[in-house]
């Protein structure tokens, strides 16, 4: 156990890791995050020790996550679970995700052009509108995003850290956990979901349904992402304990 009571990583776990605010420190804007040079190596080493059962579950689009963690292309759920990739690198069908209405990105681009400081992030199945640099626009951002989602039942508004996001209703972090837990090498392991955000609660609840649990950065890792990274790194530097979990 760590000093705060977080158990050390066990060989029988399947790890589901959120990215922003969990593995990476929050930055002023999405493209300004700093990926510590040692992080991809730590994730690769730990994945090998867990037999490949280590996934990234992020609100970011898959391509964005892959650029940040290059050369890794880890299994996981991206775009809040809209895009899935299994341990063999196969993307899952996204047919169940509604297409983003064509006019939404252009509509939001015009809104952003008139309000310097806002950042529009486009994803294959969603949009994020960031107001971290200009918090005075927070209410206006919420209003325009609410207007858009009211036009299409398949989408919902997601309050995020200094941003509002639109995502398909069917895209959840639980979807990613459930899909991966049905396939090797995740199947039969004890899922542990580590996250910091309200969207991560879905993933943690799914982990509990499979006999695992969730760890919350704000509650369990008072040192923030740096402490999460140190916890992961420790498990690559020592023999990790055999599973004590019984799935029967
Ligand atoms: O599920 P996550 O991996 O935690 O991703 C959630 C969102 O993270 C990013 O936005 C947030 O982090 C930015 C960088 O620190 C920050 O500038 C922004 O204010 C935050 O909202 C990302 O841009 C989003 O696409 C993710 O959905």
Image: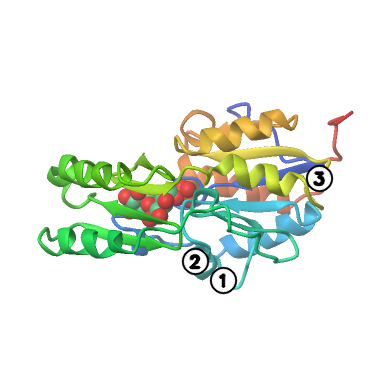
Q: Is residue 242 visible?
A: yes
**Proximity of marks 1 and 2: CB atoms separated by less than 8 Å:** yes
Residue behind mark 3: 187
- Which numbered marker is on residue 154? none
Image quarter hosting the C terminus: top right
Q: Nearer the viewer, residue 194 or 235?
A: 194
Disc 3 under 8 Å from ligand 1? The reply is: no
Residue behind mark 1: 70
Q: Nearer the viewer, residue 37 or 204?
A: 204
* Secondary structure under the numbered disc 3 in the rendered image: loop
Q: Nearer the viewer, mark 1 or mark 3?
A: 3
* Secondary structure under the numbered disc 2 in the rendered image: helix
Residue behind mark 2: 68
Residue 50 lies, with reference to residue 194, above or below; the image says below
Residue 37 lies, with reference to residue 144, above or below; the image says below
Task: Provide residue 112's location: percent of width, then percent of height.
Answer: 17, 60
Q: Is residue 11 left or right of residue 236?
A: right
Q: Residues within 10 Å of mark 2 (few under 14, many from 20)?
A: some
Q: Nearer the viewer, residue 67 or 129?
A: 129
């Amino acid at each position: 156990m760590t000093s705060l009571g977080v158990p050390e990583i066990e060989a029988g776990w399947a790890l589901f890791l959120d990215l922003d605010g969990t593995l990476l420190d929050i930055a002023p804007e999405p493209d300004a995050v700093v990926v510590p040079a040692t992080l991809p190596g730590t994730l690769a080493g730990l994945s090998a020790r867990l037999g490949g059962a280590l996934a990234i579950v992020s609100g970011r689009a898959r391509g964005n996550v892959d650029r940040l963690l290059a050369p890794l292309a880890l299994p996981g759920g991206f775009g809040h679970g809209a895009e899935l990739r299994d341990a063999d690198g196969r993307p899952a069908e996204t047919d169940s995700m509604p297409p983003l209405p064509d006019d939404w990105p252009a509509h939001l681009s015009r809104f952003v052009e008139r309000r310097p400081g806002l950042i529009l992030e486009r994803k294959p199945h969603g949009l994020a509108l960031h107001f971290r640099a200009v918090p005075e626009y927070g209410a206006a951002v919420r209003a325009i995003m609410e207007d858009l989602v009211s036009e299409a039942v398949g989408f919902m508004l997601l309050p995020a850290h200094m941003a509002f996001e639109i995502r398909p209703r069917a895209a959840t972090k639980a979807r990613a956990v459930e899909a991966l837990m049905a396939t090797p090498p995740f199947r039969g392991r004890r899922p542990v979901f580590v996250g910091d955000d309200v969207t991560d609660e879905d993933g943690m609840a799914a982990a509990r349904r499979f006999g695992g649990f969730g760890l919350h950065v704000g509650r369990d890792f008072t040192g923030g992402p740096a402490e999460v990274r140190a916890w992961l790194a420790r498990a690559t530097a020592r023999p990790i304990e055999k599973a004590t979990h019984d799935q029967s």
